[in-house]
Image (spheres, rainbow, N blue to C red):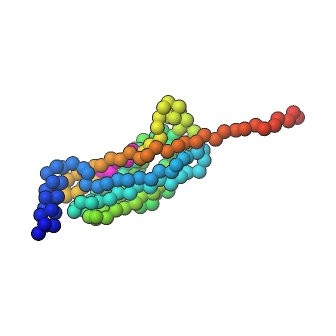
Amino acid sequence: MKKLLFLILFSLHYYCSGQGNMITITSIVPSQLTICGSGKLFTITIYNPSPFTITNDTLKVSMPNGIAYLAGSVSGATYVTQLFPNIEVFALPTILPLQSITITYISEAKCSVLAFISGGGITKNNIRVDYRANNTINYNTHITSSYLVKQPYLVITTITNQ
């Protein structure tokens, strides 16, 4: 009986609020990227702790200028489109109650990230998930931890006249 009362109160709370927060978003970012180096793996996990099925969900990943999604590298979602040079959109599968999904993709640092960093930018990704639950349209956001972008450098050890 207590479980049923809890479920009813929990459902009523979410039904009346109409706000997001029906899901939790966590992320893992690489410790570093190197400009013009190989791409690194980014991971996003979305958990549905609610009693409702999450449907019609999309993931938007906004990356700093100069950080680029590597086309075809996504797993756990379907690539949809690019809104701007640094915002990628993915379609997500349905998420059942008390279930989670994991999305991975590869991003790389382009030379243009130097302008972003030298302007004081912090390399973090903004994540937004839009979804429908209990016949209500919701969204949740998440900001990843920052990650280091390393610059390659050239060291000349000898010069030979020819």
**Image: 79 above or below 155:** below
Quadrant for the N terminus in the image: bottom left
In the displayed orientation, state which residue is furthest to the front.
2
In the displayed orientation, state which residue is furthest to the top.
119
Residue 148 point in image, percent of width and height: 53, 43
Residue at screen point 58% across, 42% down:
150
Residue at screen point 54% across, 42% down:
149
In the displayed orientation, state which residue is furthest to the right.
162
Pick the residue in front: 145 or 152. 145
Residue 24 in the figure: left or right of residue 147? left
Residue 36 point in image, percent of width and height: 60, 44
Quadrant for the C terminus in the image: top right
**Image: 98 above or below 82:** below
**Image: 160 above or below 105:** above
Residue 44 point in image, percent of width and height: 41, 55
Residue 152 point in image, percent of width and height: 64, 41
Instruction: Tell me the quarter of the picture where residue 2 sits.
Output: bottom left
Residue at screen point 34% across, 62% down:
100
Q: Determine if residue 145 is in view.
A: yes
Q: Determine if residue 80 is in view.
A: no
User: Which contiguous range is marked in magenta?
Assistant: 126-130
Residue 148 is covered by the magenta coloring? no
Residue 63 in the figure: left or right of residue 47? right
